[in-house]
Amino acid sequence: RPVIDGAFFFCVLAHKVFVGVIWVKRYRNLLCLLLLPLLALTLPQNDKAVAAQNIVTPQYIALTFDDGPASETTERLLDGLKERGAHATFFLIGEQIAGMEDVVRRMRDEGHQIGNHTYSHTHLDRSSTAALDELNKADAQLCKALGEGEYWVRPPWGFVSDTVKQSIDTPLIYWSIDTEDWRSHNADLIAHTIVENAQNGDIVLLHDIYSESVDAALRAVDTLSAQGYQFVTVEELFS
């Protein structure tokens, strides 16, 4: 009797093992799916944290310079931007382009955007006829120096009438950070204003006709580049 019971037990056990092996083979894909969450829990948490920390979201700022070109300061600014691999946007006064065509073409060739700041820095919120004439004359000077193109407009002082807005097709570009560099002429204060207020997507208003503004802009580029900011044209910022 004990011999019979032992043999019977062995047969039952062998049958269960055989059935178990067949079941595992048939459903092994399902088992793998069920085990994946358990495997994920065994991954080192520190590795996940390090991976997350290494993901850097790009941040972009557009420096814009009005009232140029000016021979010494604009060229020094271009030298500094080139050295740092930074791009900017220059809104030029039409009557100042004559004799500075090489500098204007250098702006374009080094990846900067060039825009229209009227012919003689005139209000665009007064006589619509005079305002449009100012824009057209400046545009003609830009086309003469650079060829046909779309030259975006920065209204002097930010003022423009509804009539003028409806009469032009090019974008009107304003700013989100006003350094008031024309008021202070203080490089430390100007640089501080840029760095302390900088956020992703900002457009900074400066004037490349002031030596202090050039110094401040290059300092800000150095400081913010170290924080992960990239300096692009306005058009690149909107693209």
Image (tube, rainbow, N blue to C red):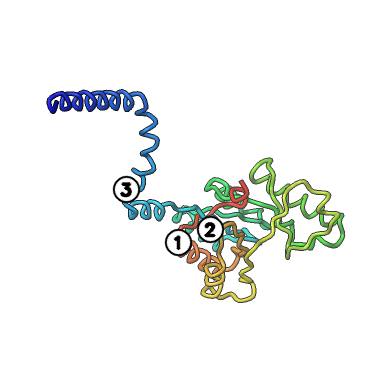
Viewer-proximal residue among 217 and 109: 217
Secondary structure of the residue carrying numbered label 2 = helix
Residue most toward the front? 1
Residue most toward the left? 3
Looking at the picture, how far across and down is residue 193, in whole percent?
Answer: 56, 71
- Reply above or below: 159 against 239: below
Looking at the picture, how far across and down is residue 99, in whole percent?
Answer: 63, 54
Asked if the residue under mark 1 is in contact with the one under mark 2, i.e. CB atoms within 8 Å, the reply is no
Q: Residues within 10 Å of mark 2 (few under 14, many from 20)?
A: some
Q: Earlier in the sequence, mark 2 or mark 1?
A: 2
Identify the mark at residue 227; answer none if there is no mark.
Answer: 1
Image quarter hosting the N terminus: top left
- Circle 3 residue: 42
Q: Residues within 10 Å of mark 1 (few under 14, many from 20)?
A: few
Q: Disc 2 versus disc 1: distance between alpha carbons? A: 26 Å
Amino acid type at circle 3 is: Thr
Looking at the picture, how far across and down is residue 183, in whole percent?
Answer: 64, 75
Amino acid type at circle 1 is: Gln
Q: Earlier in the sequence, mark 1 or mark 3?
A: 3
- Circle 2 residue: 75
Q: Residue at x 57, y 47 (%)?
A: 108
Relative placement, left or right, of 92 versus 163 is left
Q: Disc 2 versus disc 3: distance between alpha carbons? A: 59 Å
Asked if the residue under mark 3 is in contact with the one under mark 2, i.e. CB atoms within 8 Å, the reply is no
Q: Residue at x 57, y 50 (%)?
A: 112
Amino acid type at circle 2 is: Glu
Which dot, 2 or 3, sits closer to the camera?
Answer: 3
Q: Residues within 10 Å of mark 3 (few under 14, many from 20)?
A: few
Which dot, 2 or 1, sits closer to the camera?
Answer: 1
